[in-house]
Amino acid sequence: MKPFYKFSDNIFRDELLKEYIIPVAKWFMIDDKPSGYLIPQISGSFWECSLAMDFLLRVSKLEIPDEIAKLIEPKVVNTVRWMIDSLLSESSEEMSWDSAPWDTAVVLRSIINCCDQYSNLFTDDEKKKIDDYTMKITRWLIKQGVNWKSVEGYLTADSTDLAVTLSVLICVKGKYNDEFLAKNSINIDEIIETITNMLLQCAAFNTTEGDNTFKVENWGSVFNIGEVICGLSSFVLHSSNSETKKSANAAILSGLNYIEKIQGNGGITDNSVADSCGILWSYLVASKSAEEYDHDDIMVFKSLCWMCDSNKVLNDGSFLHSSYSTVFYALSLIEAYDTWDLGKKPTNEVYHMVVWLNPNIEVTERARRLDLELKCKNYAEEAIKLKELLVQNKINVYTCCVIIILIFITLVILQLFKAINVMKILNTTMLFSILGIAVVIISSIGKVCYEFLKRKYTIQSIDSTLFPTKIKKNSKKKGC
């Protein structure tokens, strides 16, 4: 493997493709024979095969040698056939792989992607069989996802099960129309919303009263947090529900912020070997759905340097000869190739930018700044809600005043025409009732105005203290 510093002035990601991505793609396919499967199939690991498929499906769309592209097609399709034949019947209407929700969701998602990309390589009977099995697998996943007794009960389970189930349900929704899903008694829109809210409730569990910050630690380890924000990212990119989407986006930002905070050396390397590769992948994937966010170039570059070191990436292209670690390593590579903007520049410019950024934008400082910006955003949203409440109360007051004036005019007119005796109606009891209602209305308006003005000046004070000037995220100094 060629180290990064020998990439010279070539485009960084092009060298990454040639020196690291293509070699690991060859390793997954074992040999040059079109027949057979992918290397994780030797150990019988369905989920490792599926993640390797996800990687190879994306590689096949890049500018790679024809012999590799032509080899990917039959290898991936044969692996799908092996997976379908290995399904376990949970009941007459439900199926899974090894009764494992995470494995089942990951595999189904890969099969859907493969069938979409290589639909011409499957027969009509195979397509019909896959559609039928997909519905049975979806029923089983939904049953596993929504039958938690409570949020407290869910906290004892693995949050990644729900996150991956969420992403595959969104894939199913994209592949099949509503009529087909209804025919199979699957209300997928409602389930997607339910599972998303379960993940968000889990993150917000045990928060102090009045604190809207997501406690992402409740999702589990840093690796789990990465996978959960990936699942929420698929929801953000899919959903039109503005309120839930807004909460999911806030949770993703908190998750990204937490990942940056927890890594002490400026790169995603403070975990186990496989976990570090998987967290980098999740970090890159989740960043795509967060509008306010951008990659931390130092973190991505240092993580790639650590991951692609010659002590880990061996001459055959694998990551320590382990398919378990290699699948996450490969997915991180392809995600960096596709989404990391700095990697699309010449290598000497990549090094130049990293050198300039390194002493000025430390990861811990960036994480603190992002945290402050999120809090400031929450304060601004609260101020908007208070303003809306004040406007609504003003409208209610004006309405009451108009009604009282109309009643008064009506009574005067009736008195003039001697239709009624107003003095008999306005006895002492009714007079005190009217005064009591007036006192309540006036005091309520005064309280709302006081709280609004108090919060307004508090926010202004915080803004002027913490943000004397507008912060520009990821500002990059130019070299001399």
Image (spheres, grey):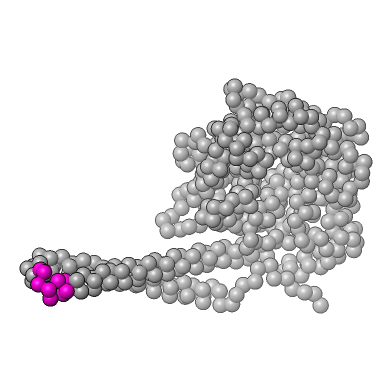
Residue drawn at x 42%, y 58% is 210
Residue drawn at x 66%, y 43% is 174
- 478 in relation to 313, above or below: below
Split into 4 quadrants, where in the image is the C terminus? bottom right
Q: Is residue 105 magenta?
A: no
- Residue positioned most to the left: 424
- 479 in relation to 140, above or below: below
Q: Which percent across, then down, holds residue 335?
A: 75, 51
Q: Nearer the viewer, residue 37 or 321?
A: 37
Q: Nearer the viewer, residue 93 or 127?
A: 127
Q: Is residue 27 visible?
A: no
> Which picture quadrant has residue 183?
top right
Q: Nearer the viewer, residue 302 or 154?
A: 154
Q: Is residue 180 visible?
A: yes
Residue drawn at x 63%, y 58% is 290
> Which picture quadrant has residue 419?
bottom left
Q: Which percent across, then down, holds residue 38?
A: 81, 33
Q: Which residues are magenta?
A: 411-420
Q: Main secondary structure of the magenta part?
A: helix
Image check: 333 left or right of 459?
Answer: right
Residue drawn at x 79%, y 46% is 58
